[in-house]
Amino acid sequence: MGPVSAQIAIDAPRERVYELLLDLSARPAFTDHLLRRYHLLRVDPVGVGAGARFCLPEAGGWFDSVIEEVEPPYRIIERGRGGRFNRVPCLLEWRLTEIPGPAGCEVTVTFWTQPEHPVDRVLELRRSQRRLAKGWREVLQRLRQLVEEERPVERLEVAGASRLGL
């Protein structure tokens, strides 16, 4: 599936939005309508190496995503695999740019998959990029609402983490 992008202006400091996006345990607070059955892959959900597994029906099912590259406070790149037999590579990129004004930024999210197997390519033709783009736009609207209203974020935890004393 070609790149599916959405962008939105947020009236909040770029650093605060970046910190929220970098913490995978906070993602369900604004993505739970699109990314279903969200699970963390490690105890520390922040920064490079942090990962999550989730179901994204609009893109073909289950996906794993791991933060691979960060450029504070400008960009976060996540790579993973998903779809049929977990063989479809995917990429999720978050870009934050300053906008004119006292404190604000523009957030752009881009998601794409590159099916290599012929069966996966055929299955992808049946998926709706329009519906997926609408889902990412709603993610950004919910992120803006969460950040601008400075609401507390309910964070997700790894099962059994309390027994580890963390």
Image (spheres, rainbow, N blue to C red):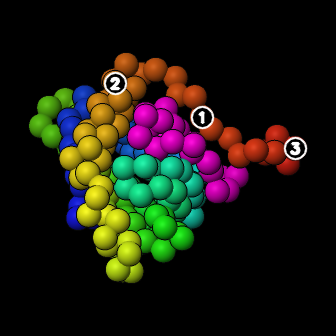
Q: Which of pointers 1 and 2 lies earlier in the amino acid sequence?
A: 2
Q: Which of pointers 1 and 3 lies earlier in the amino acid sequence?
A: 1
Q: How busy is the neighbourhood of tag 2: few (under 14 within 10 Å), some, or many (20 plus)? A: some
User: Does the magenta-highlighted stretch encompass residue 31?
Assistant: yes
Q: Which residue is mark 3?
A: 163
- Given the image, on which type of amino acid does mark 3 rest? Arg
User: Does the magenta-highlighted stretch encompass residue 124?
Assistant: no
Residue stretch rendered in magenta on the structure = 25-44
Q: Which residue is mark 2?
A: 145
Which picture quadrant has residue 14? top left
Q: Which residue is mark 1?
A: 155
The answer to whether the residue labelled 1 contacts the one labelled 3, judged by CB atoms less than 8 Å apart, is no
Query: Looking at this view, is 21 or 123 the one in front?
Result: 123
Query: Looking at this view, is 1 or 124 the one in front?
Result: 124
Q: Is residue 95 visible?
A: no
- Given the image, on which type of amino acid does mark 1 rest? Arg
Tell me the residue at 76%/44% (across/down): 159
- Quarter occupied by the N terminus: bottom left
